[in-house]
Amino acid sequence: MDCSELNSTEKSRTSKLLSEINEIYQDIRDESMQSAETTGGSVEKTVHLLKEKAERGDSQAAFLLGQLHYEEGCYAEAEVIFDGIKDEDPRALYQLAVIYYDGLGTKEDLSKAIEYMRTVAFWDSSEVGCIRYAALYNLGRAYLEGFGVEASSTEAERLWLLAADDGNPNACVKAQLSLGVFYCRPETLDLRKAFSWHSEACGNGSLESQGALGVMYLYGHGVQKDPDAALFCLKEAAERGNVYAQGHLTACYYNRKLYSRAAALGERVSGYEDISAIARHTDCLEEYIRKGIAIAMFYYARCLQLGRGVLKNRDRAKTYFSQAARIDPEICKDLQMDVVHGRI
């Protein structure tokens, strides 16, 4: 990839990193303030100044130089720099693990990636800081999915518990969320634990867990049913962009006979197309985004079918029913049973 060809997300990450570098180094900040440049020009000048500092033995500058290349998608350059400082900087070793795990600019090497990630996770020094939690979380993912290691739910759970650190807000919130999802799986089902971990993750800012809590309050999963708490969580999460919450909020509106609201929200969610982009923007799981769209689409179709909150249109209803079934057949099968038994 050419370093000058940055998409909007990469540009945002690069700009943030440039700001962080400017906060650390007065001379680089002064250089930036002297001229109004494009991001590309600013990057080029910063790279030059960081190289000078790295060559004089500034290890922080060496890492930031590698990270700047990484954020721009220049992975080969980043790999060389990170490899040179990996024995003394756990951040560099972590980034190398990511590069090898995902095959970024180089051949995928899962065994090396796991080895490096494990070294970071159990690095015997206070220097490793919060990155230890991120490494433990990624190791847990590898064990759950069997990528580079033999699959083991038990080991994934153990590593995520270490990464979650009893709900520590400075630990890995993704691990806290993952434990909430983990205890909702049929093979590891424990809804009380799921509720507890989603509560911890939500309190630490997880949008995904906020939506999950709304659903758990709604149906009494792992906690006593509380329609008011459910509606509050779902509304908050929906407003923040949680599509799973938007789908269940559509259902809530419908079941409370607020048909105009149900139809309006259902129609809006039915128009979502790029699930991967939504996942990147909201940091929510694609699986649950699909479920949210399918639920909203089904209820919108039901509104169209019966003329509730919208003009009756059976042909459009049939189209949306079919689309919802393609997105998530299992959810639509359950909802169709609710229709058959007169619950929708």
Image: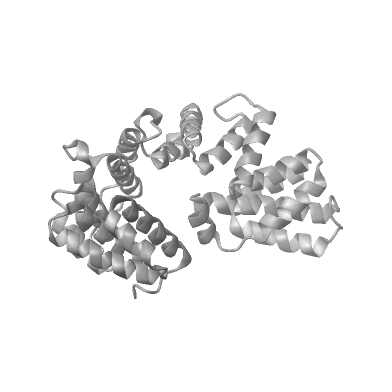
98 and 91: which is toward the camera: 91
**Residue 320 x %, y %:** 71, 60
**Residue 192 x %, y %:** 50, 26
Residue at the extreme top of the image, as rendered: 224
Asked if residue 136 lies left or right of residue 127, the reply is right
Residue 269 in the image: above or below residue 75: above
Confirm whether residue 74 shows in the render: no
312 and 14: which is toward the camera: 14
**Residue 158 x %, y %:** 31, 34
Confirm whether residue 76 shows in the render: yes
* Residue at the image point whose x is 54% and y is 27% from the top: 222
Looking at the rendered image, the quarter that the N terminus falls into is: bottom left
* Residue at the image point whose x is 69% and y is 29% from the top: 228
The colour scheme used to paint the residues is one colour
Asked if residue 313 lies left or right of residue 248, the reply is right
Can you tell which quarter of the image residue 341 is in?
A: top right
- Count of numbered circles on the image: 0
Can you tell which quarter of the image residue 301 is in?
A: bottom right
177 and 154: which is toward the camera: 177
Looking at the rendered image, the quarter that the C terminus falls into is: top right
Asked if residue 173 lies left or right of residue 25, the reply is right
* Residue at the image point whose x is 49% and y is 39% from the top: 205
**Residue 185 x %, y %:** 47, 39
* Residue at the image point whose x is 59% and y is 54% from the top: 328
Residue at the extreme front of the image, as rendered: 34
